[in-house]
């Protein structure tokens, strides 16, 4: 397992290697970009970019479900209040290259989908150069331009103005719900507990507010219109946060790389956590189908 930590500006990183349990953190500081790598380079690479919460606490069961099929790379974001989406992408790209990961599939969960588009924009802006090259994108509860502008602004105002006790109460309610949805393994329950612990910290809530601001200001539609790499949409049927039909209709009409979608009936916005096995099977199927198609598509090979 490799652990790489990036300070709050995209600068050269330091990498340390440890033995022991795969996925074990060397430094649990929440103010650094952290990367964990599960599996060797002989497997296809799947890179998980978390949602607005910014860490890997809710992806435990999905990681276990896809274990052995892919090299699973996951990130935990720093609690920065200054980074742009391009700076997120630059730091993540730097971390991947420092760990000798020049290409892979991107799995963007909710807010993470915005970093997916930023990574793709960086790749498209440097044709012929060899930075990190995405092979395909899966939007897990993700989107292009967030369609409900007023909704994200309301959420941003809540994180900025609501008293701490009110926000903590909301997270406690979520904890009770999450414990029911993630109770299949002790590891998943431990992840939920860690999720709640982190969300109670004021700096963490401020970082979430900053990420909401980035969503409200970001419009990656020009990038999506140029994308010929495979793009898929994965979501739960019960998703009160992202209007799926709206997102998928736009992708179908305007994104050349859009290949299709999967809606999982007994899942919610956190589709990877609430339907881990079905999600893992679908992601693996898409990766296999699209890698075969890529070999036969000259235009997609050029973009890759």
Image (cartoon, rainbow, N blue to C red):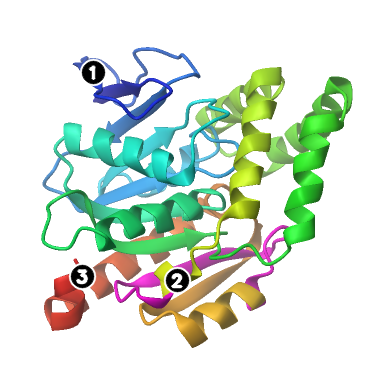
Q: Nearer the viewer, mark 2 or mark 1?
A: 2
Residue in front for this viewpoint, 64 or 192: 192
Q: Secondary structure at mark 1?
A: strand
* Crowd around label 1: few <14 · some 14–19 · many ≥20 (10 Å): few
Residue in front for this viewpoint, 210 or 172: 210
Q: Position of residue 5 (x, y in %)?
A: 33, 21
Q: What's the mark number on residue 121?
A: none
The residue drawn where x is 65% and y is 44% is 213
Q: Secondary structure at mark 2?
A: helix
Q: Are marks 2 and 3 in contact (CB under 8 Å)?
A: no
Q: Quadrant of the C terminus?
A: bottom left
Residue wearing tag 1: 14
Q: Position of residue 26 (x, y in %)?
A: 34, 13
Residue wearing tag 3: 303
Q: Is residue 251 left or right of residue 91?
A: right
Residue in front for this viewpoint, 288 or 120: 120
Quadrant of res 36: top left
Q: Secondary structure at mark 3?
A: helix
Q: In the rendered structure, which segment of residues is drawn in magenta?
A: 225-245
Q: Nearer the viewer, mark 2 or mark 3?
A: 2
Vertical placement of residue 221 versus 163, above or below: below
View extreme (bottom): residue: 253
Q: Earlier in the sequence, mark 2 or mark 3?
A: 2
The residue drawn where x is 41% and y is 66% is 282
* Crowd around label 2: few <14 · some 14–19 · many ≥20 (10 Å): some
Q: CA distance from mark 2 to mark 3?
A: 16 Å
Q: Is residue 226 magenta?
A: yes
Residue wearing tag 2: 222
Q: Is residue 26 left or right of residue 100?
A: right
């Amino acid at each position: 397992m490799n652990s790489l930590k990036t300070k709050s500006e995209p600068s050269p990183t330091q990498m340390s290697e440890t033995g022991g349990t795969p996925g074990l953190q060397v430094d649990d500081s929440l103010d650094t970009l952290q990367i964990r790598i599960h599996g060797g380079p002989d497997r296809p690479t799947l890179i998980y970019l978390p949602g607005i919460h910014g860490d890997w606490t809710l992806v435990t069961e999905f990681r276990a479900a896809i274990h052995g099929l892919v090299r699973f790379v996951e990130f935990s974001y720093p609690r920065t209040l200054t980074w742009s989406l391009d700076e997120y992408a630059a730091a993540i790209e730097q971390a991947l290259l420092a760990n000798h990961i020049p290409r892979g599939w991107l799995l963007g969960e909710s807010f993470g989908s915005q970093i997916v588009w930023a990574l793709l924009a960086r790749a498209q802006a440097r044709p012929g150069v060899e930075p990190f090259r995405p092979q395909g994108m899966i939007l897990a509860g993700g989107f292009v331009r967030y369609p409900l502008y007023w909704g994200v602004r309301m959420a941003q105002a809540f994180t900025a103005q609501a008293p701490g006790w009110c926000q903590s109460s909301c997270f406690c309610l979520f904890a009770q719900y999450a414990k029911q949805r993630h109770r299949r393994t002790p590891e998943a329950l431990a992840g939920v507990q860690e999720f709640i612990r982190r969300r109670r910290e004021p700096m963490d809530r401020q970082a979430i507010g900053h990420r909401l601001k980035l969503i409200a200001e970001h419009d990656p539609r020009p990038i999506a219109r140029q994308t010929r790499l495979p793009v898929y949409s994965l979501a739960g049927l019960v998703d009160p946060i992202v209007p799926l039909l709206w997102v998928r209709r736009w992708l179908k009409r305007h994104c050349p790389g859009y290949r299709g979608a999967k809606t999982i009936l007994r899942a919610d916005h956190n589709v990877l956590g609430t339907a881990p096995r079905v999600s893992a099977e679908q992601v693996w199927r898409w990766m296999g189908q699209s890698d075969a198609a890529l070999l036969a598509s000259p235009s997609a090979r050029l973009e890759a």
